[in-house]
Amino acid sequence: MTATDIQKARVQMGCERRAPIETDALVVGAGPVGLFLVFELGLLEIRAHVVESLAQPGGQCIELYPDKPIYDIPAIPVCSARQLVGNLLKQIEPFVPTFHLRQEVQTLERCPDGRYLARTNTGTTFLAKTVFIAAGAGSFQPRRLKLTGIEQHEGQQLFYRVQNPERFRDRDIVICGGGDSALDWALHLTEIANSVVLVHRRDDFRAAPSSVAQMRAACEELRMQMLVGQVTGFEADQATLRKIKVTGGDGVTRSIELDDLLVFFGLSPQPGPLSSWGIEMQGRQIVVDTGKFETSMPGMFAVGDINTYPGKKKLLLSGFHEAALAAYGAAAHINPNARQLVEYTTTSSRLHKVLKVETPSPSLLAA
């Protein structure tokens, strides 16, 4: 996420707070469905705080396949996940949501007044009138390199995410993985690193064909190297990682000197503490009604891949529909005596004011 993505959004990165943040809506998960939910809530003048376990909004699609094409978004013949998330972030700018990134909701309990008290793993607490679980398949954690003892280098020379590319300038880098993230960062870091070696278990990649072609061209031009094999060991000098050992399909083990090791084996969905929140669940999914996608707990809603109901389809389109109905359900919960009206963004002067756009002239509306 860049400043241009959300020019007005407030972002808090794992900052601990003692006093609860009071809010009308707490959204757990900032994937595409969670982001569209923020928009639907905003149209109903319900401000939201958003908790996301990853370092940026966008969820699984922005982490796993940011540049792969998506073809089933209405009126958009094709777009990448990165473009979709960028547009969703642009769409919610008028509502100035606050993002709490790199945080996970650990505990959630209903208070006597009907509100929910939620606490994240960093100590941030919320007192919310409504809660929306838009966590996809759960919180996503990187699949780690399974070598005993290498975890001591995590955050120092071993990384599963790139937060600051400049950290790797003029350094000797080894990147493990065969997906989009591995190839995208390999190609990017060839421009600033001293050397880049890409290690993958086979000479076949899950990344976009264009990225694979660029990588092979970079290898032919000696701007980087690609090695087929698996990391089977490492050498360290006290607290400093010096080499990794890569065993190829030929059975030969080679040592590669390095300054930093980047591992992109994908993300593993973790269900997290949902089962302890008292919600009715079916397996790892939350049971909801199909009128407002409310869970078994009043004022708590679940949208996207995390929920289940008869006929459920795990599609972005379905998640967007669920988000719209859940937002209306929340409005009725927050203001039960208010009259519920369905307004249209093309004609409603109230919505134009909320969206900070000009109301079209009467002649255009009549047309």
Image (tube, grey):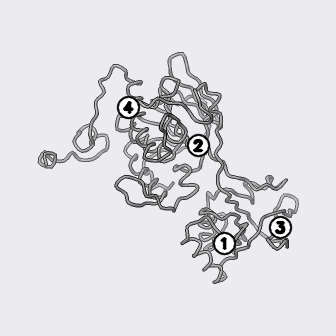
Q: Out of 228 and 157, give the one closest to the viewer.
A: 228
The earlier-in-sequence mark between 2 and 1 is: 2
Looking at the image, tell me whether mark 3 or mark 2 is earlier in sequence order.
2
Residue identified by numbered label 2:
137
User: Mark 1 belongs to which amino acid?
Assistant: Ala
Q: Which mark is residue 245?
A: 3
Q: Position of residue 319 (x, y in %)?
A: 45, 42
Label 2: how many Cα within 10 Å (few below 14, some 14–19, many 20+): some
- Specify the quadrant of the image occupied by residue 344: top left
Q: Mark 4 or mark 1: which comes first in sequence?
A: 1
Q: Which residue is mark 4?
A: 328
Secondary structure beneath dot 2 equals: loop
Q: Nearer the observer, disc 2 or disc 4?
A: 2
Residue at 56% x, 50% y is: 60
- Dots 1, 3 in contact, CB < 8 A: no
- Amino acid type for the residue under numbered disc 3: Lys
Separation (CA) of disc 2 from disc 1: 35 Å
* Label pair 2/1, CB-CB below 8 angstroms: no
Q: Secondary structure at mark 3?
A: strand
Distance of label 2 from label 4 (alpha carbons): 24 Å
Give the x, y percent position of residue 163: 61, 57
In this picture, residue 255 sits left or right of residue 331: right
Residue where numbered disc 1 is placed: 193
Residue 247 percent coordinates (x, y): 82, 68
What is the residue that sits farthest to the left in this orientation? 363
